[in-house]
Amino acid sequence: QLVSFRMRHSTALENRLFEKEESDPDRRYFVYRLGYELARVLDAAATRFTVATLTDATISRGDSNSTQDAALMANVIFKPEVSEALGIAAELHIDEATGRSAPGLLRLFRSLQQDEDSLMWDSPMFTELDKTFAQEPVTVRYCDSIAGTVRYRSVCPYYHLVASMVGTIV
């Protein structure tokens, strides 16, 4: 499930990480920290979270002379635990260690987001998280990598099918 977080993380905004290449060290560190903090707060493996994109989520208030509400949008994929060793738990996409599915992790995150006394608010990563921003998650699936890039999409393209059809037509 793809979940969007709107945050006013000062370092990320000052460095305009949403404009930097994915290989930029500052951006990579921010993405690592976001995944690690999600894992710590939700008591799950860091591999359960993938930061898909970082974008500018600045909101202009009124005309061009008015102030702007600077923010960063992080689109994070909450992934199911997939392991051959888990047996039935893998089929149900449940993390054997915590018993939480990807939707379960999201429900826990939303609950912690609303509880101002939760562990989440002790984390410097989440202190500026916009509690009022809670879009519905988007169901995504892992698609075969294309040109070495990992892609999660709501609908996977049929590259292999098209390639095989072209081969049979020729």
Image (cartoon, grey):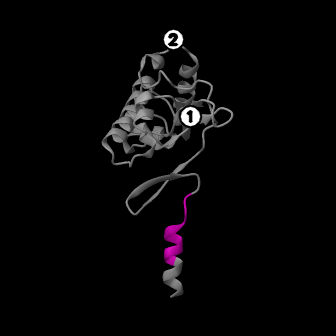
Q: Is residue 163 magenta?
A: yes
Quarter occupied by the N terminus: top right
Q: Between residues 167 and 100, which one lies in front from this camera angle?
A: 167
Nearest to the eye among marks 1 and 2: give it: 2
Task: Name the amino acid, label 1.
Answer: Pro
Q: Are marks 1 and 2 in contact (CB under 8 Å)?
A: no
Residue extending farthest to the right is 62
Could you tell me how far apart the alpha carbons at marks 1 and 2 are, in whole angstroms?
23 Å
Q: Is residue 92 magenta?
A: no
* Disc 2, SS: loop
Image x and y of residue 30, in percent: 38, 35
Image x and y of residue 80, in percent: 48, 40
Q: Residues within 10 Å of mark 2 (few under 14, many from 20)?
A: few
Task: Name the amino acid, label 2.
Answer: Asp
Q: Which residues are magenta?
A: 156-164
- Which quadrant of the figure has residue 63? top right
Q: Is residue 63 left or right of residue 20?
A: right
Residue occupying image coordinates x 58% and y 56%: 155
Q: Residues within 10 Å of mark 1 (few under 14, many from 20)?
A: some
Residue occupying image coordinates x 63% and y 33%: 65
Assign the magenta stretch its main secondary structure. Answer: helix
The answer to whether one can see residue 46 in this image is yes
Residue extending farthest to the top is 117
Residue extending farthest to the left is 25
**Which mark sits nearer the N-terminus, 1 or 2?**
1
In the rendered structure, find residue 117 and report the number of the disc placed on it. 2
- Depicted 100 relative to depicted 24: above or below: above
Disc 1 designates what residue?
103
- Depicted 73 relative to depicted 43: above or below: below
Image x and y of residue 10, in percent: 44, 28
